[in-house]
Image (spheres, grey):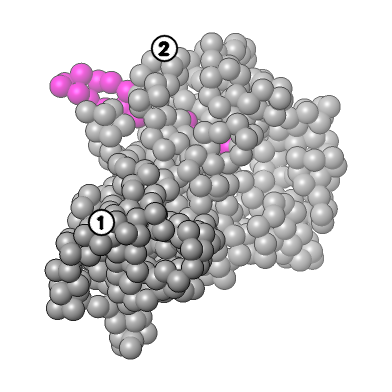
Amino acid sequence: MKSETGFPKLVRPMTKVHAALLLLLPALHGCAGMFSGSLEISASQRVHPVLIRNENNPLLRLTVEAQGAGHTAGLFLFKLTGTDDLNDIESLELFYSGDREEFEVGNRFGDPARPAEQVVFTGNQELSPGKNVFWLSVRLRPTAELGNKTDAVCTSVNTSAGVLTPTDTTPGVRKRIGLALRKHMDDGVHTYRIPAIATTPKGTLLCVYDMRWRKSRDLQEHIDIGLIRSTDGGQTWEPQRAIMDMGEWGGLPQEENGVSDPGILVDENTGEIFVTAVWMWGKPGKHQWRDDGSEPGYEIGKTAQILMVRSTDDGLTWTEPENITRKLKKPEWWLFAPAPNRGITLADGTIVMPTQGRDETGYPFGNITYSRDHGATWTVSNPAFSGGNETLAVQLGDGSIMLNMRNDKPEPYRAVYVTWDLGITWIPHETNRKVLIEPNCNASLFRFDYEEEGESKYILLFANPNAPDGRHHHTVKVSFDDGMTWPEDHQILLDEGRGRGYPGITRIDDQHVGIVYEGSRSDLAFEKLSLDELLKR
C-alpha cells in the first residue's frame, strides 16, 4: 500500500501485535539457550554521515551467523537512543542483503517505520547457513538539522532459535547529519567533482565545482564550472548555475572545450569574488598534467588556459570568462593553473591565490599568485616545491604564509613550505614531508579565528583522506601551534569509506565551520562542525 506521494505507507512505531510479541520476549529468552550455539548476531556501524536528499542512508548493520539450515528471523526491535532529534528522521527501513556485506536496498524486511524511541520490524526471513546481513536504513527530512546526530541500537531479534541480543562491535558510533550537496545525475550531470568553498563578507556560502556532464573522467572532457549559494549557513542551497561554460568555442564540440579544477578567492575588504579554472581547447584524450596535454607557450589549443570570472554582488551575477594566461604564465612553463581550493586575504589586505604548474622541464610545482590592488594586477611567486601541486595557503601568527601541497614523491606525507616575502624565497616547514599523511590527493587548510573569554585565538584546520594507501578515512585535524603538531585527540573522522577526497573548509559563523568533500555517500557531501567539538570543550 502506497501513500499519495508514491512512497510506501509507514507503519506505526508500535502496533498492538508488536506489543503482544514484546510481552513474549522474556519467556522466549528462557528457551533461547537451547539454540544459543546455532545463531550468533552482531551489530556494527561504519563511520560516515547520513545525508539529507539521500533516499536511503545505511545506519546500522546486523550480521546473523547461522551454523545450520532452517532458521528464520521474524522480529527486530531497535531503539533510537542517541538520536538528537527524532524529528530529523522521516522514515526507517530494514533490508536483507543475504551474505553480501555492502549496503543494498532490494529486499525489504517488513514495512517502513516512522521514528520513535522504539521501532519494530516484523516479517519472516529464512536464514541461509553462514552469514546473513541486515541493514537498518534512515531517510531524513529536508529540514533535518545539520550538525545533529542519529543513532540506533538493536536490542533484540526474534528468531527460530529464540530471542537474541546482538553484540555491539562498534559502540559509541553516532552518525552526523549532512547534506548530499550534489549527487550523480543531479540536473542531468553524470558526476560532480573538485569542490571549493568560501564565505563572503555577508555570510553567504559559495561552492564551486566541476560539472562533468558525460562521465567522471578529467579533462579533456565536457566539463563546466558550477556554483551554488547558501544564505542560511548551508542548511539549504539555491539552484545551481554554470558560471564557466565555453560551449562550442572555436567550432569544436563541448567535449573539446572543458573547464575544470576551480579555485575561489574572496577579497574580505571589497567583497569581490574571483573564481579561476583551467580551460582546454582541442587535444581530445589528453590531460593537462601529462605529456603534451599542455605545452610551453601561450597559444590556445597548445597550452592550457587560465580563465577568471568575477562577482561584485555576493555571487548573484558573474562576468564573462576572461583569459588571463598571458598575464600570469611564463612562456617556458608547460602549464600554469589555479589550485582547486580557496584563496585567502592577508592581514594587510593582500589577496592570495594558491597556484600550481609544470615548469620548463614539465615537472609539477606549487606556488602562490597575489594582488596588492584588489585584483587589478597579479604577481606570480617563485615555486615553493618541485614535485607536488594542488596547493593550500594560510597565514600564520607571525605573518608568514604556509603553503601545504600534494606530494607526488614516494614518501606518503604532505609537502609544507613557508614564506615571509610573498614567495620570493621559501623554506621547508619542520613538518615538511614527514607529518601529515598523504594518499596523493588534494586537501584543505583553513585558519579559524575565535574569541574565548575575551581573548583572540585561532586554530588551523586540515582535512584530507587520512590514509597512505587510498582516498578513505576522510578526517579533519586541528592544530593549536601553527601546524607544528596535530594532536590525535583533536582529529574528527567524518567518513571511513572510499571517496575521491578533495575537501574544502570555510567559516559558517563565529561558532561553526562547513566542509564539503567527495565522500562515500554522495558526489559532494556537506557537513557542519561546531567550534566546541573541534576544541573538545
Residue 146 coordinates in the image, percent (x, y): 30, 52
Residue 37 coordinates in the image, percent (x, y): 39, 54
On the rendered image, what quadrant is the N terminus found in? bottom left
Horizontal side of residue 440 vs 18, given as left or right:
right
Dot 2 lies on which element?
loop
User: Amino acid type of disc 1?
Assistant: Thr
Q: Can residue 146 be seen from the camera position used here?
A: no
Residue 178 coordinates in the image, percent (x, y): 36, 53
Dot 1 lies on which element?
strand
Q: Are marks 2 and 1 in contact (CB under 8 Å)?
A: no
**Residue that mark 2 sits on:** 398
Report if residue 261 lies within the magenta region. no
149 in relation to 22, above or below: above
Horizontal side of residue 284 vs 316, given as left or right:
right
Quarter of the rendering containing residue 458? top left
On the rendered image, what quadrant is the C terminus found in? top left
300 in relation to 470, above or below: below
Few, some or many C-alpha atoms within 10 Å of disc 1 (few <14, some 14-19, many ≥20)? some
Q: Which mark is residue 155?
A: 1
User: Foreground residue, 204 or 55?
Assistant: 55
User: At x 45% / y 30%, what residue is drawn?
Assistant: 462
User: Amino acid type of disc 2?
Assistant: Asp
Quarter of the rendering containing residue 483? top left
User: At x 85% / y 42%, what residue is drawn?
Assistant: 292
Few, some or many C-alpha atoms within 10 Å of disc 2 (few <14, some 14-19, many ≥20)? few
